[in-house]
Image (cartoon, grey):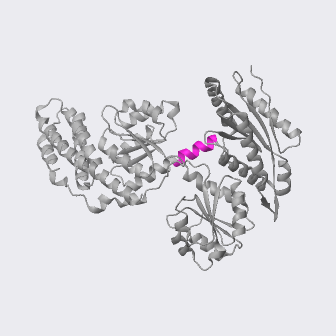
Amino acid sequence: MNSEEQALFAREMETLRQGYRERLVIQLKELEELAASLPFNPKALVILEQLIHGLHKIAGGAGIFGMPELGKKAKILEIQVKGIRDRMLHSAQCTPPAGELLSAIRSLTIQDIHPIIPQEETSDPAMNNLPPLPASASNPDPHVLILDANARAAKELGLSLRNFGYIPRYMQSLFPEREETSEKEPAAVLLAMEGNEGRDGEEIRSLFQGRPPLIAISDSSDFSLRLAAARAGARGFFTRPLDVPKIVDCLEQIIRKEEASPYRVLIVDDDLLLAEHFRLVLEASGMEVHTESQPEKVLDRLSTVRPEILLMDVHMEGCSGPELANIIRMEEEWVGIPILYLSGEKDMNAQIRALESGGDDFITKPVDNAYLAATVSAHVSRARRLSELMAKDSLTGLLKHIRIKEALEVEMSRSNRDGSSLCVIMLDLDHFKRVNDTWGHSVGDRVIKALAHLLTRRLRRSDSIGRYGGEEFMVVLPGCGPEKAAALMDEIRLNLKSIPFQAKGESFTVTCSIGMACSCLGVSAEELLQAADKALYQAKAEGRDRICMAPMPCT
């Protein structure tokens, strides 16, 4: 967070703390009244349960809002009241020591609710360590800055990157970089190390501190240069002659992380102030956070919010966290969503029982802000990765065969419903067996990845791209007419054949053949796919490196 965001966060947190302190005065008064009513109430067990619930809330929340001693006292007293309740359950003659309880509750005095929060907590330095999760980028053509004293080499690299949809800018010196790049922050900086031999890695790192990711390029693979690049914090090191598809692969890994959409979180807690506290903490880390205080509404919120992780308290009135987790796990759609219990419950057996009831992890209140954000981030990151492994091809990151066909079915239904245009593309690399036989399968994999990156960068976010099998790709272009689709795919075809691939000290290029079919009312997804496939074979038969459009009579 920048200084302005930190100041806003601190103000919002202090408002919450003040609200919590005011509420705490009321809560303690209510607990006193409950304890005082015990000798005169035939439903003593009910009163004890209410006392346990109230003390549990204070034990979990006081430390979070800057009153750790109060939280510890409340936790000790909660355990004591639980012991009284358990003895009453096993012995009808046992009566609650009302006087002792009242005295103990009164020991949670107003002096523990101090109005002054230590300065370090107000500024909340832990927030500086929260894992940054940038919001989704909207620019389909990322800018890259090439810093190279050799203008000709920089231009050649820039031209190659343009084929993949990058917008290059050039500079010959590190010094003016700060001023001249302010107009548009690049997604990455490609730095030629040769012009900077006199600078060590730490000096280069200081120049790029807080700036875009750095990728080093060099004429030499000398260890000292690699060490300087590592000390500068470079994400990659590439030697000339440059294998541009490899550089693009590195860039794509960087940009894919930067463009990732925010993690979606749903917090279920009947303590509204605590839920709001956790919301602020996670939102400060770049997450999209929603809260719900009523367990009976959670299934509806799951459908509307579509969270990637669920945080819930264990002890809630009317429905406990484990009970709610069981209800959620009954729904097939939500069997895999991570559920984290966020509770002041410290009893290990109780935690184990909660985890056995559908939970994935247990975080004990009070919890450090940075730890909470890191734990949530780790769980969602892992869940996303598992989802990708199930839906996406491991080599290219594109949709698998079955998933791209499912995407076509969805878009075909929408097209038939609203009458919008839809084009399906089948694309195949020409003479790909020759590439594998001549240069090896690892080089063939690099060619496939390069085409995947090219398609990803040149097509819209609304388009679906899949690896149909081997060296064959399938693209679904919703809302795209035949002329526009043909122009777009021809640009991709020309871009691909302009990319030089490096292997065994030599350079080579590849071409592709493309078949297209566009929908009309009444045509099924399978018919459209077959038409595009037939057009692809026609392009192959006519000499490859071309596009053929399938005739598709409307029925």
Residue 126, how many percent across, how many down? 38, 59
Residue 90, how many percent across, how many down? 24, 35
Q: Nearer the viewer, residue 228 or 347?
A: 228
Magenta: main secondary structure: helix
Q: Is residue 167 above or below residue 351?
A: below
Q: Quadrant of the C terminus?
A: top right
Q: Nearer the viewer, residue 139 or 72?
A: 139
Compared across the picture, whether 542 is left or right of 341 comes to right
Tell me which residue sits at (14%, 31%) in the image.
41
Residue 289, how many percent across, how many down? 42, 43
Q: Is residue 214 magenta?
A: no
Tell me which residue sits at (89%, 43%) in the image.
543
Q: Is residue 386 magenta?
A: yes
Magenta stretch: give its range: 381-391
Q: Is residue 323 above or below residue 274?
A: above
Compared across the picture, whether 169 is left or right of 489 comes to left
Compared across the picture, whether 49 is left or right of 338 comes to left
